[in-house]
Image (cartoon, rainbow, N blue to C red):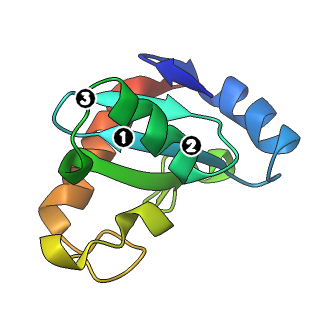
Amino acid sequence: MKQVDSISITELRSMAQRMYESFVKADVDLAKKIVVIDMDMHADGEAYLLEHGSEQRDLWGINLRPDKYGTDEFVEFDSMINLRPYQGNRSRGVEDKKTRAHIRQLIQGVVHE
């Protein structure tokens, strides 16, 4: 797992082949604009971010699908860490459209060709 400010699609493809073949797990801290990537479980990235001062309410788990880069399917909103009924998120997805848009915007600033 590593924290990234910038990562290429080529690097993501390599990570995906090592782990899950079609995707790479990532967690984001929307408040601090931090992305951690390439972990076995989203909970690993969540623990890392919490240990480094992040707040639970700002953390979201996603999957990145390198072969879908440039499409709406590139970012997949599916993680157990997203289950937060107290925040109005009752699924493994990210139900709030504004939150999904912020996550996509953050990822767009980090991932490049």
Q: In the figure, is residue 31 to the left or right of 21?
A: left
Question: Residue 85 location in percent, x, y?
Answer: 22, 79
Q: Amino acid at mark 3?
A: Lys
Query: Quick one: label 2, few (<14), some, or many (20+) residues within 10 Å?
Result: some
Identified at 47% across, 54% down, the residue is 62
Q: Nearer the viewer, mark 3 or mark 2?
A: 2
Identified at 65% across, 40% down, the residue is 39
Above-or-below relation of 76 to 4: below
Q: Residue furthest top?
A: 5
Q: Amino acid at mark 1?
A: Val
Residue tagged 2:
44
Residue tagged 3:
33
Question: Residue 56 location in percent, x, y?
Answer: 25, 49
Q: CA distance from mark 3 to mark 2?
A: 18 Å
Q: In the figure, is residue 20 to the left or right of 65?
A: right
Disc assigned to residue 28: 1
Q: CA distance from mark 1 to mark 3?
A: 7 Å
Q: Is residue 78 visible?
A: no
Q: Amino acid at mark 2?
A: Asp
Identified at 60% across, 53% down, the residue is 68
Query: Quick one: label 1, few (<14), some, or many (20+) residues within 10 Å?
Result: many
Which quadrant, please, contains the N terminus?
A: top right
Q: Are marks 3 and 2 in contact (CB under 8 Å)?
A: no
Tell me which label, 3 or 2, sits earlier in the chain. Answer: 3
Q: Secondary structure at mark 3?
A: loop
Q: Are marks 1 and 3 in contact (CB under 8 Å)?
A: no
